[in-house]
Amino acid sequence: MLLITKALTLAALLALSAAASSMPQVVKQGRKFTLTVDGKPFIVLGGQVNNSSGWPDRMQEIWPVFKALHANTAEVPVYWEAVEPQPGEFHFEAVDQIVLDARAQNIRLILLWFATWKNGVMDYAPGWVKADAAKYPRMIDSGGKLVRVLSPHSEATMAADRNAFAAFMRHLKDLDGEQHTVILVQVENEPGSLFTDRDHSPASNQLFEGPVPASLIAALHRPPGTWSQVFGPESDEAFAAWHVAKYVNSVAAAGKQAYGLPLYVNVWLREQKNFMRPGEAYPSGGATSNMLDVWKAATPSVDIIAPDVYVMDYASYHRVCESYSRPDNPLLIPETGGFGAFARYMFYALADHDSLGFSPFGIDRISGAAVPEGIPGVAAGTSLMDLVRPMLDNYRLLGPALEQIAAWQGTGKLHSAVEEDQITERLLTFTNYEVLAQFGRPIVSYGGTFASGTDRKTGRSMVAEVAPDEFILMGFDTRLRFEPRRGSRSPKAQFLWVEEGTYENGSWKPIRRLNGDETFFELSLPPQGAILRVKLMTF
Ligand code: DGJ
């Protein structure tokens, strides 16, 4: 009898741990983060719908766009004002329908909790919150004027948001706790305050004059003092960041306790905006790069701080990715651009910065519409679908390989090779080989064969070393040459074989072997894209 009980207990334990491991989660091994869904590595190739598209009927028009894009995940808002139109009266019908529709189409969801903060203002708070400023106070600017932002110092507002978010997560658990159509939830949207650097109400001012909390001092390894003493010119912003982050963490913790999905907070960046003044150029108190340490100290219940990356130049794109990819924070890009250079920036994000996902904003706009006049370099009337074609090609090509890409991330064996203005070649160094990626027509000149660059900067690829003499090459418009690493005893490299193929259910599926004309002169990833697997030898 004792034995049977023990056996049952073990079986129950195994079942429990299997169920637990199939929950979406962010796993950290060494320095490497992986998002797992159904127990397998998962990279979000997503799209975010417009702000007012989180309604089932509207989504009916948008689901085909996700299919056409080969996206695996849709990011869709959930509105506090719609979920709780009266205090304590909850309506989840719209959320339910969206989850069921996504599930029926095999698309995963990231739901975005638009509540106390949406882009640094309070527009998605329910009417009963907006209308009762005595109970749910607004922030006051340094001139004593009320602004359209809820104060993070109000226990009543925090409790109301926390209560609603917990009810939503509890509901989600009942609805989706087995299937995990919803894989991540975003808490608030770009929290922080526009129009003021912090709340200047008397109560808040009093707090500001007091000491920085000991837990923050300990986390930052700084000497104690008042906010001004510890943070100097950034004191108002740091004060705001701490209080907004504590508030968001309290909401997140309640939600997580109800249903333990991974949670993230997205960020309106401060990079290169105007004079970079908090509350003017970007919401003050958000998890901007200068406030990331403060946020990490305040948000143990938030798994990821995720930048909305709209910076246009590739150097800034790299810089932002670098600042949010840290030992205590994985990179996830929940919002970014969908056309132009962003199609190649996706290669940086996935291959060089190990992003757990990439998700252009405003996906519904591309269904059928044409671009208006005034977009530099784009003829008016061009269909948006054509404009996003390179991104669409990326998704189509890389989609089947995502599980592998997730496994290669963080190993140092995966690198991008991407063309930029005046950057027509990239030299990558691996264990035994150097790989030269070249973009555009060859130019023979003193010093060797160089590359002219493509007409529209379409050269973008990634190279993974899967064994010391074996590589996977994925991408578009790139010629690839191999040489033994400098100093190798054998000066030349030769293909043992080259295969073109794809991945199916996590395994390599060769389509054909390449030889003859395809490999004699050079190896190329064509404009329409390809995945190649090459095995080399030296001699
Ligand atoms: C960033 C916000 O997070 C989104 O909700 C949306 O407003 C976009 N900006 C618009 O560009």
Image (cartoon, rainbow, N blue to C red):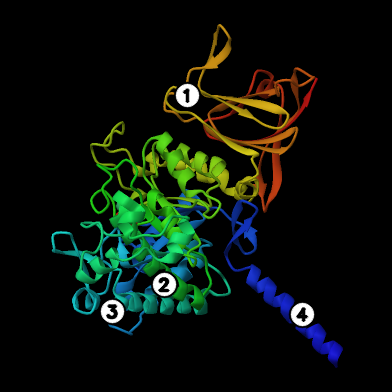
Query: Which residue: 79% across, 19% down?
Result: 490
Mark with earlier residue (1, 4): 4
Q: Residues within 10 Å of mark 1 (few under 14, many from 20)?
A: some
Q: Mark 1 or mark 3, which is nearer to you?
A: 1
Q: Is residue 73 left or right of residue 213?
A: right
Residue on which the image places disc 1 = 423
Residue on which the image places disc 3 = 85
Mark with earlier residue (2, 3): 3
- Identify the amino acid type marked 1: Ile
Q: Is residue 97 left or right of residue 436?
A: left
Mark with earlier residue (1, 3): 3
- Identify the amino acid type marked 3: Pro
Query: Which residue: 65% across, 63% down?
Result: 39
Q: CA distance from mark 2 to mark 3?
A: 22 Å
- Where is residue 501 drawn, in percent x and y? 67, 39
Residue 386 is tagged as: none
176 and 539: which one is in front?
Answer: 539
